């Protein structure tokens, strides 16, 4: 059956929605919640249609989902403090325990004084279960911190900013177990948004050392039970797309609790998508987006898990051609 097509205009102007960066939007904000195959287009001021998202239900085999879930579950639950506005407005209760005092705060980030009483040079945002696997186009800031009594200097780092992430480098068997899912995502991306995929794949091929197995992706962001604040993705290829997959603990390990919510929403257009295990969403991540609240399906239950993957290409990988 042919997917449903929706054409929409912005419901909130850019100068208004931009002031909501880092804020959360509940389900009640969204006029449309998509739960079936659908393509959504934005109608701009020139009456031209631009693809916002393409969504397909049950297009990924459960076996692929569960294999990847088992490989990524532990890694996805590690907390990081570098998500900026996507982690929500700065909340001192959501900062790491080693932060003794915040200094020079902005809406989303803050410099701080650590447990040793010293002011730190790096800034942090709310602590959330979100990280990256695959390859990345920036130095790992942790290599410049003291480790084993030594401090790495920038002079000792190769003059190429691109790197293999720690998980991909050190958890080789688990990384390999995620690849069938990533390859499936690439195929679906190609079928659902061929023009975007073609541009992105052509760019990815220029840096084969940082391309995930002949796909259009260099990088995967993994999140666990993480509700994102309103943000636009930065650092990935503008002409490309972000591609979202959700893996559910209760589907892979029956007996665990199920959840509800976690819709991926575009608040400027008041449209959201209910992406579940086995579904696939190709989307324009350069539009404002966020998640609705994730809660247990049965009140009081806590053993639920929503593990999401966003597959994309970092735009500065091109600087690593050598």
Image (cartoon, rainbow, N blue to C red):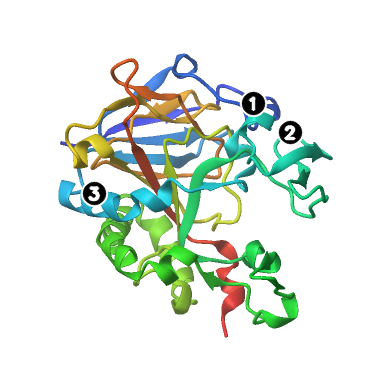
Find disc 2 in the rendering and name its residue.
107
Residue at the (60%, 50%) spot, across then down: 234
**Image disc number at residue 243:** none
Q: Secondary structure at mark 2?
A: loop
Find disc 1 in the rendering and name its residue.
13
Circles 3, 2 touching at the beta carbon (< 8 Å): no
Q: Earlier in the sequence, mark 2 or mark 1?
A: 1
Label 2 or label 1, whichever lies nearer to me, is 2
Q: How busy is the neighbourhood of tag 1: few (under 14 within 10 Å), some, or many (20 plus)?
A: few
Residue at the (44%, 78%) spot, across then down: 208
132 vs 48, nearest the viewer: 132
Relative to 286, 118 lies left or right: right
Relative to 187, 234 lies left or right: right
Label 3 or label 1, whichever lies nearer to me, is 3
Q: Secondary structure at mark 3?
A: helix
Q: Earlier in the sequence, mark 3 or mark 1?
A: 1
Residue at the (39%, 59%) spot, across then down: 197
Report if residue 243 is visible in the image.
no
Find disc 3 in the rendering and name its residue.
65
Relative to 99, 34 lies left or right: left
């Amino acid at each position: 059956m042919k997917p449903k097509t929706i054409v929409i205009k912005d419901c909130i102007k850019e100068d208004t929605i931009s002031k909501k960066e880092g804020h959360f939007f509940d389900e009640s904000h969204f006029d449309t919640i998509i739960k079936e195959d659908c393509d959504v287009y934005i109608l701009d001021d020139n009456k031209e249609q631009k693809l916002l998202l393409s969504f397909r239900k049950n297009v990924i085999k459960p076996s692929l989902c569960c294999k990847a879930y088992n490989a990524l579950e532990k890694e996805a639950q590690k907390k990081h403090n570098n998500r900026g506005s996507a982690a929500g407005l700065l909340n001192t209760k959501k900062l790491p325990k080693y932060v003794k005092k915040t200094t020079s705060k902005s809406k989303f980030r803050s410099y701080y004084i650590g447990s040793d009483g010293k002011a730190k040079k790096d800034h942090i945002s709310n602590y959330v279960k979100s990280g990256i696997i695959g390859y990345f186009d920036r130095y790992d800031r942790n290599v410049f911190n003291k480790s084993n009594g030594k401090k790495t200097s920038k002079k000792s780092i190769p003059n190429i900013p691109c790197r293999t992430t720690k998980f991909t480098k050190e958890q080789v068997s688990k990384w390999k177990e995620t690849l069938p899912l990533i390859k499936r995502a690439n195929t679906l991306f190609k079928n659902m948004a061929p023009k975007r995929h073609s541009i992105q794949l052509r760019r990815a091929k220029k840096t084969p050392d940082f391309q995930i197995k002949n796909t259009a992706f260099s990088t995967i962001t993994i999140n666990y039970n993480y509700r994102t604040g309103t943000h636009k993705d930065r650092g990935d290829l503008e002409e490309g797309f972000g591609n979202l997959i959700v893996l559910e603990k209760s589907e892979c390990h029956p007996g665990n609790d199920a959840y509800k919510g976690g819709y991926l929403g575009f608040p400027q257009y008041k449209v959201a998508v209910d992406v579940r295990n086995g579904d696939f969403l190709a989307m324009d991540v350069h539009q404002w987006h966020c998640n609705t609240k994730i809660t247990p399906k049965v009140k009081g239950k806590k053993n639920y898990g929503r593990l999401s993957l966003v597959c994309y290409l970092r735009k500065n990988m091109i600087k690593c051609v050598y």
